[in-house]
Amino acid sequence: MQRTRTRPLGGLLAVVVAAGGFLGLLSPSPVGALPADSPAAAPAAAADGTATVFYYTKTRDWARYHLHYAPDGGAWTTVPGVGMEPACTDWVKRTVTLGTAQGLAATFTDGAGVWDNNAGRNYDLGTGSITVKDGVVAHSDPCTGGPAPTPPPDPGPGGRATVFYSTRTLGWSTANIHYRPAGGTWTTVPGAGMRAACTGWWTTEIDLGPAASLRAAFNDGNGVWDNNRGADYTLPAGVTTVADGTVTTGAADPCAGEAPDTTAPSAPTGVTASADGVSVVIAWEPSTDTMGVTGYQVTRTGGSRGTVVTDVGSTVHSDTGLEERTTYTYTVRAVDAAGNLSPASAPAQATTGAAPPAPAPGKPLGTDPRKDPIYFVLTARFNDGDPANNRGGSRHQQSGNAANGDPMFRGDFKGLVQKLDYIKGLGFSAVWITPVVLNRSDYDYHGYHGWDFHRVDPRLESAGASYQDLINAAHAKGMKIYQDVVYNHSSRWGAKGLFVPTVYGVRDKDWSWYYDERQAGFEYDGLTVDPKSGKSYYNGDLWATAEPPGNTCVDWGKPTPFTSPEGYRIHNCQWPSPTSGMFPQDLYHDCWIGNWEGEDSRSCWLHDDLADFDTENARVQNHLIGAYNKYIDMGVDGFRVDTAVHIPRTTWNRRFLPAIQERVAQRHGPEAARNFFVFGEVAAFVNDKWNRGSVNHSAQFYTWKERKEYGADDDAAALEMYAYEQQQGPAGQPTSTNAFLDGNRYRTPDGSRFSGMHVIDMRMHMNFGDARNAFHNGKDSDDSYHDATYNVVYVDSHDYGPNKSSERYAGGTAAWAENMSLMWTFRGIPTLYYGSEIEFRAGRRIDCGPACPLASTGRAYYGDHLAGDVTASGFSRVDSATGAVATTLAQPLVAHVQRLNLIRRAVPALQTGQYSTEGITGEMAFKRRYTSGSTDSFALVTVTHGATFTDIPNGTYTDAVTGDTRVVGDGRLTVAAPGKGNLRVYVLGGTGRIGTAGPYLK
């Protein structure tokens, strides 16, 4: 996980900077927020606990309309519900009494068996005036114009304002104007509903009394505002238009003389329906329209639940939770901005099967991890198998992702299962996936902001494609799953079941756009949309205005001198911070990191969205151990440990690593435990063997057991160990020969001092700007690791490129081929970040947070390159491929990595062998050997350059690349330079050429 090497400001100012910067970015829409002096906080509730529900009829054309509802906590009406009455053109309404309830669940029906039940979820509505239009809920009165504000007291000439507002580029289903006449007061939020005037325009007339102008802001009734970038709009009496921020006074009626759009879109074509268990996916080709298609209606018939109409915004709909073994028929109609409906498409049918059974727990494959090249994917960015679980989050608009139709949570386990054959066809037998636990933050698709460590994030799962299903599917193909895990920190919102902070919040005139109402019974899971706020990123459970019991945050709710970028007053305890007292000191650390090579790097917060656990606390340890036991029980094959360097080695060696070993052995046996692969991220972005001389912050340090006894208390032991090892320094650290041959002889490795954690080879990673630098720097460090043959080796990742570059590697195809040739033959486990096989997003900035669209970064969505079908009967063996994935598989580096995997898999010395450069001249040349039982594999390797090998065993050597055979009788073999990216692998007693010649291996 990437971190910024700057120290956050301490104390209150840090909280202000964090809160101000975040809240400025978090606005639900880039068009802004409430006017700064606007009074009311929440959508206005009707008197006496009522809700007036408006339902849009133009796209339904039913003979009758009924509202079937249940107040929160109450009983449902009798089917078909209560009748609705005409309200105004294209709208019907019904006012219902709620008593003390704060909302209602609702569905709509024609009374004859046709239902709009929000795709099976029902509509969850609040109080006041509410519109439901083509599946979109908003707070507005589309017919009456809403309550008028108090007029100004001073007499004057008076006037009326006719306001037209354009939503052509906004996609709003309703529009409200929140206003105050000059000298008067503001309307109650969300303001007065506007009437549809013509396609893309809304209008209302306002009595200004004696005033000659008004201040105004517009909103969609769901908290998305256009307040003229914080300045509000000043509108005079008369006719005014507001379109995309431009005000035109004395304007002509934009709808006058405009012929109404009565042309319907074309009927959708190519409708298909395919069943998977009790789910059906319906897809179709886009319709065309003179003014543009705004959505589609999918009508389902069949089963015992009647006809169901569902509004969708894309050309794919996933219909879930259906009856077993039932035939359903689907038709699709297109809708345009004027509400015109296309003719229905041709019907498509699908018959459901049985509901998928709960998958059985898996079991690790339990083989030597060095045999398995690793393919690393950001699950949410790899391949989308189920659009129904896609979520954009609070930064969807601001980041630019919405404009690209690219929600941050897009890829999922179903998409990964669908493309396991792609990965297998490349030759990889292990898949490293980003963290799977439920996350909670503003931009959490990557998985490193864990909130519920005991739960898999629902945004990654689908019916029949749970995390367990992924593990089982991979194992069925002989492939391993390595799960990224985080022990160092939780999300800024704490860890459910351990501690969740409560921040100060108030739904006043400034902050009602941000703080959601608490919804009793609603629980955040990242996927489910809170119907009252319309958000899957609901925050109503995280704040309180009254100081909560047991609060330890200092100066709760007191105003500070600081304001957010919008000008809103910031209060103490309004944002999680380590120094405010908000987090309990026994569970979380209470400081900001200062020295990245100091002791505080292991006991302070790295960033305000990474709440730093006190990992020496027994409650924290037990919480994390218990959570990760769940995934061990599911049968994962290993853990990649994020931010491992920020936890003391004593804690790893005393608590977490033994707990992993014990659980794997208990559930799956000692052999599985021995080969359960744990590899840590110990980030050191320097070329030093030891990170700026600090042994405690160097990768190899974490591969060793402790060498002396420390006190029983984990906090004290961490400090004792730190001081002792820093005093010993680099010269006093243990060394190992486990990675090295003894001459030409394979030596039995000594595992007695192994900690249980291997590591990512940061030094090679940092030097992969040039393969020679990576090779020489790598082997220079190898005696300081417990066993460097287990090092995970990659060129770039989701955090950095070589030399701490913020961009994906862009050295060119030949340089990539050379790097790969080295990684696949030198000691260590070759690892490839998704898409590198086609130089995907080469040179692009890897991560810019929500400041730019994901599509422009090194974390872009890869699924477009995987579209189509692919089957692989073996590793590096693709049987068939169609569509875009066939084009992807035809790229030169794909052929290169496929053959490298074939060669490595066929030569044991390249997988698990030790190495030596003794008696060898050449730039990147070495010999490797592995001996065990009846296996004795010996290979001579040179990458790009020529080499001479001396004092080698006599015998017949065959090059695995060309098939060239050499007989050595004097212990000497000379190899000509094969060329950049190419290599020679002369295997003693080799069987011949492995694979076919490609663009680089030839």
Image: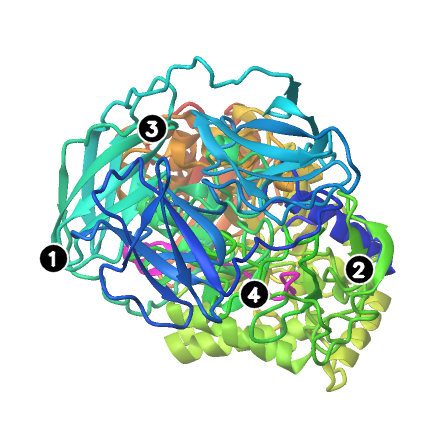
Residue displayed at 57% across by 54% down: 44
Camera-side residue of 748 and 268: 268
Q: Which residues are magenta?
A: 470-493
What's under tag 3, amino acid-wise? Ala
Image coords of residue 288 (percent x, y): 31, 21
In the image, what residue occupies the spot 78% across and 39% down? 183
> To which residue does mark 3 refer?
884
Question: Residue 1's spot in the image, x, y percent?
Answer: 62, 51
Which one is earlier in the sequence, the residue at label 1 or at label 3?
1
Give the mark toward the camera: 2 or 1. 2
- Whichever of callouts 2 and 1 sits on the residue coming sooner in the sequence is 1
In the rendered image, residue 314, in percent from the top left (x then y), is placed at 35, 36
SS assignment at label 4: loop
Q: Amino acid at mark 1?
A: Arg
- Would you say residue 482 sits in the magenta stretch? yes
Residue where numbered disc 2 is placed: 571
Q: Which residue is mark 1?
A: 325
- Cα separation, mark 3 vs mark 2, equals 53 Å
